[in-house]
Image (cartoon, rainbow, N blue to C red):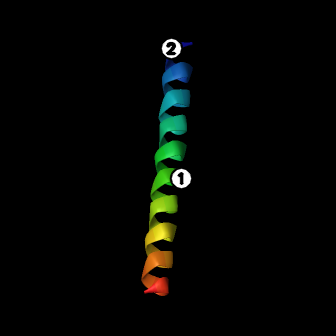
Amino acid sequence: MTGSAIAFLVIGATVLWGGLLLTLMITIKNEKAAN
């Protein structure tokens, strides 16, 4: 039970950070394109 909970947290954190980084990269690309 604890192992699956930790795995779920790790996967959730990875997805969250991945989405955050993706959003940042897209924003930077758009700003560079605008300039």
Q: Label 2's element?
A: helix
**Which residue shows up at 56% across the image and 22% down it?**
4
Q: Is residue 15 above or below residue 2?
A: below
> What amino acid does circle 2 point to?
Thr
Q: Which mark is residue 7?
A: none
Q: Residue at x 56, y 29 (%)?
A: 8
18 over 22 or under it: above or below:
above
- Cβ atoms at labels 1 and 2 below 8 Å apart: no
Which circle marks residue 19 in the picture? 1
Determine which of the numbered discs, if any, sits on residue 2 in the image: 2
Tell me: residue 7, above or below residue 13. above
Residue 16: x and y, percent?
Answer: 52, 44
Give the amino acid at mark 1: Gly
- Sequence-wise, which precedes: disc 1 or disc 2? 2
Query: Looking at the image, which is closer to me, 4 or 31?
Result: 31
Q: Quadrant of the C terminus?
A: bottom left
Q: Residue at x 48, y 52 (%)?
A: 20
Q: Quadrant of the N terminus?
A: top right
**Which residue is located at x 48 percent, y 85 percent?**
33
Local crowd size for mark 1, using a 10 Å CA cut-off: few (<14), some (14–19), many (≥20):
few
Front position among marks 1 and 2: 1
